Image (cartoon, rainbow, N blue to C red):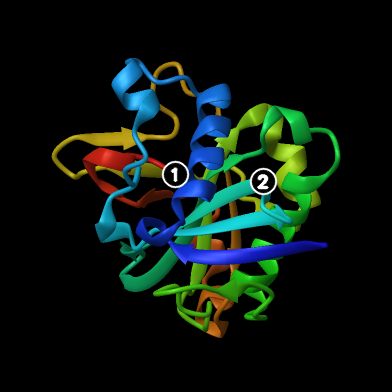
Amino acid sequence: MLRILAFAEGDVPVALRRQVRAAQEEAWPSATEAEAASLAPQHDPALHPRSLILLEGDAVLSALDVLSTRIEHAGSAWAASGLSSVVTPSAHRGRGHARELVSQARVMLVEQVDIVEPVGNAERFGPRADVVLFTCDRPLQGFYEACGFEVLPGTVLVGGTPQDPFPSDGPGMDKVTLGAFVTPAAVRARGRFVGARIGLYSGPIDRLW
């Protein structure tokens, strides 16, 4: 039986974290053996990282993290969330598990439906995000569209910090910005997000999500 569990990133049980880290190492190998072996949280705690894990029994089929921050854009403040570190262990790829998890994450974030089981300090995903914004490599655009997110043509997310910005259209980057508008105010402001440069400023650890 498949189920989705939600955790504050630091509360993911060790047995599950080992499986997630192994999948991440397959997808994005660490520079050192110490980094590869670390089970420490990967994200900036200031971004309130929450981990969603799709399980069958005790086996991790897919995992992702949701990061959240407040942004200033077009003269207004917005609560923004985005997806990060979407990964599926190689043994379970090609079966639609990542699509299932990302699609359900969208339902949770955008439609405000609780489809996960919160564990420990993980809160139910209530009406907290005004807008969902994140980037992906261009070849993955169709995958995220199939999961229900929309491409925001010409939109650039500027990560990093104001002093050390990291834009999604920087040298060597081939990113697409995807989004979803949750609250009525965000829906009305959609045109202000399309074709815009948006100061995400997610910090020096995550830089860009």
Give how far across and how far down residue 163 sits, in percent.
Answer: 13, 39
From this view, report whether residue 149 is shown above or below residue 157: below
Relative vertical location of residue 30 with respect to residue 153 in this rendering, above or below: above
Q: Is residue 11 left or right of residue 114?
A: left
Which residue does the numbered mark 2 point to in the structure image?
62
Which image quadrant is residue 79 in?
bottom left
Element type where label 2 sits in the image: strand
**Tag 1: residue type?**
Trp
Residue, x 77% and y 55% (percent of image)? 100
- Is residue 129 at all visible to an observer of this figure? yes
Q: 24 left or right of 74?
A: right
Q: Which residue is mark 1?
A: 209
Could you tell me which residue is drawn at 54 percent across and 66 percent down? Answer: 6
Foreground pick, 56 / 167 = 56
Considering depth in this image, is 68 or 149 the residue closer to the camera? Answer: 68
Mark 2 residue crowding within 10 angstroms, few (<14) / some (14–19) / many (20+): many
- Can residue 149 be seen by looking at this rendering? no
Q: Secondary structure at mark 1?
A: loop
